[in-house]
Amino acid sequence: MSNIEPPPAPSPAAPPQRSGCLTAIMVIFGVIMLLPGLCALLFGGASVVDGGRIDSDIAPLVFLGLVVGIGGVALIWVAIRGRKASPARNRP
């Protein structure tokens, strides 16, 4: 009898990597989303400095701008982190 080894088991399929173009688009939209957050910080800060508190008519807009700005930071973080983390997931 000969020693015939069974064929190796197929390796798990690697997740498809994101293209560089998609990463660039995500970063560009993230930077665009940072602009309302910056405006919210400027107008909210100016309102606090002038009157000591944020006016009730501008407060929802400041909050919305901050939420959109945080979304921009998250989008940039996912775009950059996703590209760096892809090869690490393929290691055994």
Image (cartoon, grey):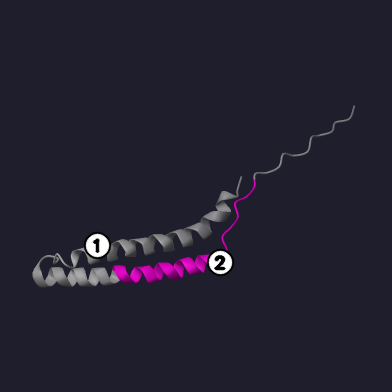
**Mark 1 crowd level (few <14, some 14–19, many ≥20, 10 Å Cα):** some
54, 4: nearer the viewer: 54
- Sequence order check, earlier mark of 1 and 2: 2
Q: Quadrant of residue 39?
A: bottom left
Q: CA gap, disc 1 to disc 2?
A: 33 Å
Left or right: 71 as drawn, with respect to 64 = right
3, 20: nearer the viewer: 20
Residue at x 33% of width, y 64% of height: 68
Left or right: 68 as drawn, with respect to 50 = right
Mark 2 belongs to which amino acid?
Gly
Left or right: 25 as drawn, with respect to 55 = right
- Image location (x, y in percent) of residue 76: 43, 63
Which span of residues is magenta-colored?
A: 13-37
Write down the residue under mark 2. 20
Q: Residue furthest front?
A: 57
Asked if residue 69 is positioned above or below residue 10 in the image, the reply reads: below
**Does the magenta portion include 21?**
yes
**Does the magenta portion include 83?**
no
Quadrant for the N terminus, please: top right
Q: Secondary structure at mark 1?
A: helix
| CB contact under 8 Å: marks 1 and 2 | no
Residue at x 52% of width, y 55% of height: 85
Mark 1 belongs to which amino acid?
Phe
Write down the residue under mark 1. 63
6, 22: nearer the viewer: 22
Q: Secondary structure at mark 2?
A: helix
Residue at x 16% of width, y 67% of height: 57
Residue at x 89% of width, y 30% of height: 2
